[in-house]
Image: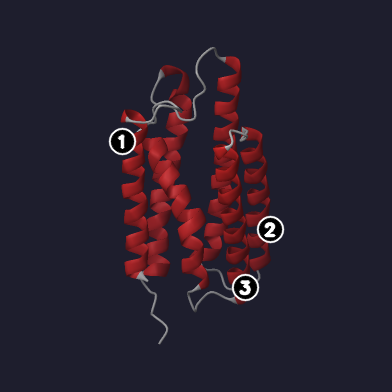
Amino acid sequence: MKRIWCFSLITCLLASLFFYEWQNHFAELGGNVSLVKALWLGLTIFFWLLWPPMVWTDRRSNSHLKQVYILFWIVMLLRTGIELCLLSINAWHYRYGIAHDIFSLILLLTGWLYTLKHKALPAQRTLAVMALMFTAESGFAYYIAEFNTNANHADLWFITWQAPHLTNQIITLMLVLGLSAWLYYIYHYWVKTFTDIK
């Protein structure tokens, strides 16, 4: 488990750095991205796509926790596929993403409440953390949608440390630092104590 954890986390970090360099030096659309935004994207990939399989394959996870994580993971895979298809035909709109963010927020909070009567685990508490991430993500999507609507410029998908976006960037930085602390908590109280199933 430690190897899987470290490999997944390092992969997301390297992917974030690669995306940061690519978007700022080679991408023709979307605008420049700050490093903190790139790291935020990497953390969403880790928590929403790579973390769930680690939970349901852990023998300490009860059936209720596994059910919630499997359902959430399937929903995220469906979103990824649908979003990529819509982007490929230029039919994506921010309201679709915001709607899914709100749906995922409700799903995770419901799942968290569903598992509360059972033994509390870091993986259980992380459901609430992931729900908060979707709250932030829907706010980010609404922010950039409104910015693109109300400003006379080429559509932006990403933002940097420019004057109009400083508050947004500071919030993102705080979230990245908070999630980094939560990663340490998960590692210390869950991953570190994992024993492989024989």
- The relative height of residue 153 versus residue 191 in the rendered view (above or below) is above
Determine which of the numbered discs, if any, sits on residue 102 in the image: none
Residue behind mark 3 = 118
Task: Mark 1: give few (<14), some (14-19) or many (20+) Cα within 10 Å.
Answer: some
Q: How is the image coloured?
A: secondary structure
User: Which quarter of the figure is the N terminus placed in?
Assistant: bottom left
Query: Residue at coordinates 36% horizontally, 67% vertically from top-left?
Result: 4
Element marked by disc 3: loop
- The relative height of residue 195 versus residue 17 in the rendered view (above or below) is below
User: Which quarter of the figure is the C terminus placed in?
Assistant: bottom left
Q: Position of residue 144 (x, y in %)?
A: 55, 27
Query: Residue at coordinates 56% horizontally, 49% vertically from top-left?
Result: 80
Residue behind mark 2 = 110
* Amino acid type indicated by mark 1: Glu
* Amino acid type indicated by mark 3: His
Spatial separation of the CA atoms under disc 3 and disc 2: 14 Å
Residue behind mark 1 = 21
- The relative height of residue 26 versus residue 9 in the rendered view (above or below) is above
